[in-house]
Image (cartoon, rainbow, N blue to C red):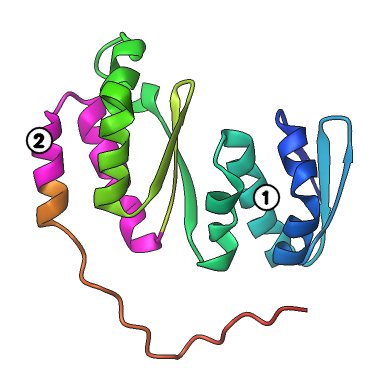
Amino acid sequence: MKVILSEKIARILKARAQLERALNLKITNRGKEVTIVGKAEDEYVGEKVIDALNFGFPFTHAIEIVEQDFLYEVLNIKEYAVSKDLGRIRGRIIGAKGKALKVLSDLTGCHLEIKDNEIGIIGPPESIERAQEAVVLIIKGSTHSNVYSHLEKSRPEEVVDLGLKNPKERL
């Protein structure tokens, strides 16, 4: 049993039935506390999905953590910032009309969201590290064109599924 404090409780309650089915968990709430009960592995993944929903990711992106074995990571801008002007750094990451964030998302194959001084990343394990590296480069002041060209040059090869992993059984 895990208890998670949630600022966006309405988003979780709205998708409770779908979450319970996808995560194999029982979800209850009391005020801003969300309680999840199930197997330890399911609780761990459920906590990641609920954290992603709290961060601001849409349900469709957050549920990919379970359905496609994606990872969820959060970067704190303050840890990498050279300048104290965090508003400017956030603006560089987002870009004009959100274009830079969209290009980063397209080039890395990850979903990116910004909340306060944190950046949430959901994506395949082989792409998460590239996305983190690209965001850190922009935070430290690299030009967007250099970061984009680096991402294009370092694209990983497609991962071939040899059929060794058993598909998850749904109850």
Magenta-span inclusion, residue 58: no
Q: Nearer the viewer, mark 2 or mark 1?
A: 2
Say whether disc 2 or disc 1 marks the residue closer to the N-terminus. 1
- Residue most toward the top? 85
The residue positioned 20% from the left and 34% from the top of the image is 137
Residue extending farthest to the front is 97
User: Where is residue 36 drawn, in percent x and y?
Assistant: 81, 52
Q: Position of residue 4 (x, y in %)?
A: 75, 40
Q: Residue at x 31, y 52 (%)?
A: 129
The secondary structure type at the circle numbered 2 is helix
- Residue 7's place in the image compared with 146, above or below, is above
Looking at the rendering, the stretch of residues picked out in magenta corresponds to: 124-149
The structure residue drawn at horizontal position 57% and vertical position 67%, both measured from the top left corner, is: 67
Q: Residue at x 49, y 20 (%)?
A: 116
Quadrant the N terminus occupies:
bottom right
| Amino acid type, label 2 | Ser
Q: Is residue 126 above or below residue 56?
A: below
| Relative horizontal placement of residue 4, taking residue 65 as reference (left or right) | right
- Location of residue 56 by image quarter: top right
Q: Which mark is residue 117?
A: none
Per the image, the residue denoted by label 1 is: 47
Magenta-span inclusion, residue 142 = yes
Disc 1 crowd rating (10 Å Cα; few below 14, some 14-19, many 20+) is some
Q: Where is residue 75, by image quadrant? A: top left
